[in-house]
Amino acid sequence: MTAPRRGLSSEPGILRTTERTRLRRKADRASDNAEIVAAILDEAMVCHVGVAIDGRPRVIPTAFGRIGSHLYLHGAVANSMLRALVAGAEACVTVTLIDGLVLARSAFHHSMNYRSVMVFGGGEAVTDPDEKRAALAAIVDHMVPGRSQATRPPNDGELRATLVVRLALDEGSAKVRNGPPVDDPADLDLDHWAGVIPVAMIRGQPEPDAATPTDLSS
Amino acid sequence: MTAPRRGLSSEPGILRTTERTRLRRKADRASDNAEIVAAILDEAMVCHVGVAIDGRPRVIPTAFGRIGSHLYLHGAVANSMLRALVAGAEACVTVTLIDGLVLARSAFHHSMNYRSVMVFGGGEAVTDPDEKRAALAAIVDHMVPGRSQATRPPNDGELRATLVVRLALDEGSAKVRNGPPVDDPADLDLDHWAGVIPVAMIRGQPEPDAATPTDLSS
């Protein structure tokens, strides 16, 4: 296994698979290939950040951005999850894309097709203004590619009001299930429908807000 | 505040909002209305279960079912997350539905429209065979309503191989954002597009597996 790459590389390397991230069952679903990890992260709209606060687990859905081999989270400076990370709490960041409902002939073999990533690590507050601006741009561009160039960038007051936390894509792994149900041979003659119902996140027609001029020539 | 309802009620009551689940900022987005909580849970395909294992947070995406005011998780008997819960670890179960990307004229006011639920509590292994069967049916029916009636139900061996864990919908809350971006008044004249890009999970055309007879009359 190669050593983890660090720094703001645009080409993430191989993530470390540790005792914690090694899949114990269904290991064929696992991957530590950083390109697969990055592709899953980039497609997801939110991640779920797990952190212990006062010793108790909390799982918070939040937007994020990626630059090379780092994830960026952001929030108000008083955000308790971000403050816990900056204070040294470890995070588990999980991203999940659902691709299909897998309907087998037996209830037991029902499953889902999915692509998920789990990343472990500590967070660091981003204090360098250039990195902070780049991270916030990455978070906006993660929603809509190129969007950061089509908005008013953060001003100094907004930057001060925002806490940005960086996590290294270092220790973690991807897990992918794909394909049809796997029924027991004895069940194949049963008269139940079996197969996959594909599911996907789609984006609809953009809805301009009320302050948008209705006459685009005005 | 009313007392939490317990038991397998089909009409969940009001969840307890505690110091931990009370929203500190943007409190107008919060709800402890159990009907809202239940509707969000029922629409989500997966939940993210956060639990500390060996003192470190882990966030695991998983299918689930709901019966009244209880959530049910399931997995192999060796599943480390379920075993941690049964051994007394506390869970934070989070469900997130993304409804829209909220694009403001400023990067700072970008947001998402979403509906999320966060539930805290301990888990209990379900040992009663009837409740276990009902829970597994609820998990399958959560994927496709009525599906449990159109499959081979679990046999005794499959039941023994499956660990089912019950969590009470007791302490928790929902959080909802909806509507257009909220720009600073000074930004309203900027020439940037602003509004909402709706997003939704959709289900596609079911794809029968290879063992399905192509001639339905056969």
Image (cartoon, coloured by chain):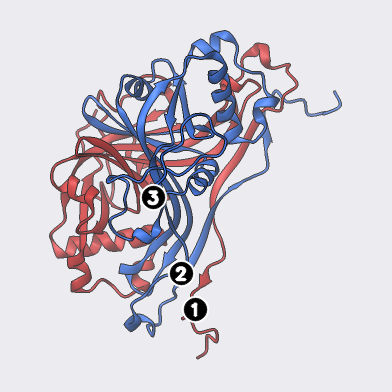
Chain colours: A red, B blue
Residue at mark 3 to residue at mark 2: CA–CA distance: 19 Å
Task: Say what secondary structure mark 3 lies in.
Answer: loop
Residue at image x 70%, y 23%?
Answer: B211
Instruction: Identify the residue at image location x=50%, y=49%.
Output: B36
Q: In x, y percent, where is residue A61?
A: 36, 48
The amino acid type found where label 2 is placed reads Pro
Front residue of B52/A173: it is B52
Question: Which amino acid, by three-letter code, is at mark 3?
Answer: Val
Towards the viewer: B142 or B1: B1
Q: Which residue is mark 1?
A: A210
N-terminal label among 3 and 1: 3
Instruction: Please tell me the numbered disc located at residue A46.
Output: 3
Q: Secondary structure at mark 1?
A: loop
**Nearer the observer, A133 or A209:** A209
> Is disc 3 in contact with disc 2, using a CB cutoff of under 8 Å?
no
Q: Chain of mark 1?
A: A
Q: Are marks 2 and 1 in contact (CB under 8 Å)?
A: yes
Res B109 quadrant in image: bottom left
C-alpha distance separating marks 3 and 1: 27 Å
